[in-house]
Image (cartoon, rainbow, N blue to C red):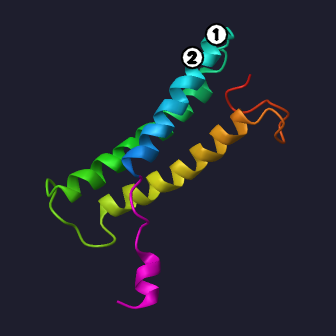
Amino acid sequence: MSPDDRALDPPPPPSEEELRAELLRFARKILRLEEEGRLLSSPADLQTVLGELRRRLFEWEVRRAAELGIMESRSRGSDSDQIVREAREAEEQLRRDLDAADDPDGPQGGEGPLES
């Protein structure tokens, strides 16, 4: 396998610890927003973050199933690989959104996607 071929391989799936940490971080955010009386102030933003978490969870589930031999292997470029790539892109956007929402001194002055 050439270095160029390895560069095309998708990155490894999120670890169980990483996924758990993201889910717990979102759970804490929901609790904080509820305590502040702002849980439903921005339902579209909540749905966006939930969608991204769902994609990340799905990516982890697909990769985990493949590791356990539950799913048949597929060649590079298959639909499942595209789904995983899209999930990774969504994960990166989720991380940026969560980081922006958690940083009160960030470029938006504390007004992240969930800070309406």
Q: Is 49 situated left or right of 18 in this image?
A: right
- On the image, the x and y values in percent for residue 62 come to 28, 51
Region in magenta: 1-14
Residue 81's place in the image compared with 104, above or below, is below
- On the image, the x and y values in percent for residue 71 come to 16, 56
Inspect the image, locate mark 1, and give the three-letter code of the amino acid beneath it.
Glu
Q: Toward the viewer: 85 or 102?
A: 102
Q: Is 115 situated left or right of 95 in this image?
A: right
Q: Toward the viewer: 20 or 13?
A: 20
Inspect the image, locate mark 2, and give the three-letter code of the amino acid beneath it.
Leu
**For residue 3: magenta?**
yes
Q: Secondary structure at mark 1?
A: helix
The residue that label 2 is drawn on is 31
Q: Are marks 2 and 1 in contact (CB under 8 Å)?
A: yes
The alpha-carbon separation of the residues under discs 2 and 1 comes to 6 Å
Q: Residues within 10 Å of mark 2 (few under 14, many from 20)?
A: few
**Residue pictured at 14% horizontal, 53% vertical:** 70
**Residue pictured at 48% horizontal, 39% vertical:** 21
Q: Can you say which quadrant of the picture contains the C terminus? A: top right
The residue that label 1 is drawn on is 35
**Residue pictured at 70% horizontal, 34% vertical:** 102
Q: Is 72 situated left or right of 110 in this image?
A: left
Instruction: Tell me the number on the disc at residue 86.
Output: none
Q: Secondary structure at mark 2?
A: helix
- On the image, the x and y values in percent for residue 12 come to 40, 63
**For residue 33: magenta?**
no
Q: Can you say which quadrant of the picture contains the N terminus? A: bottom left
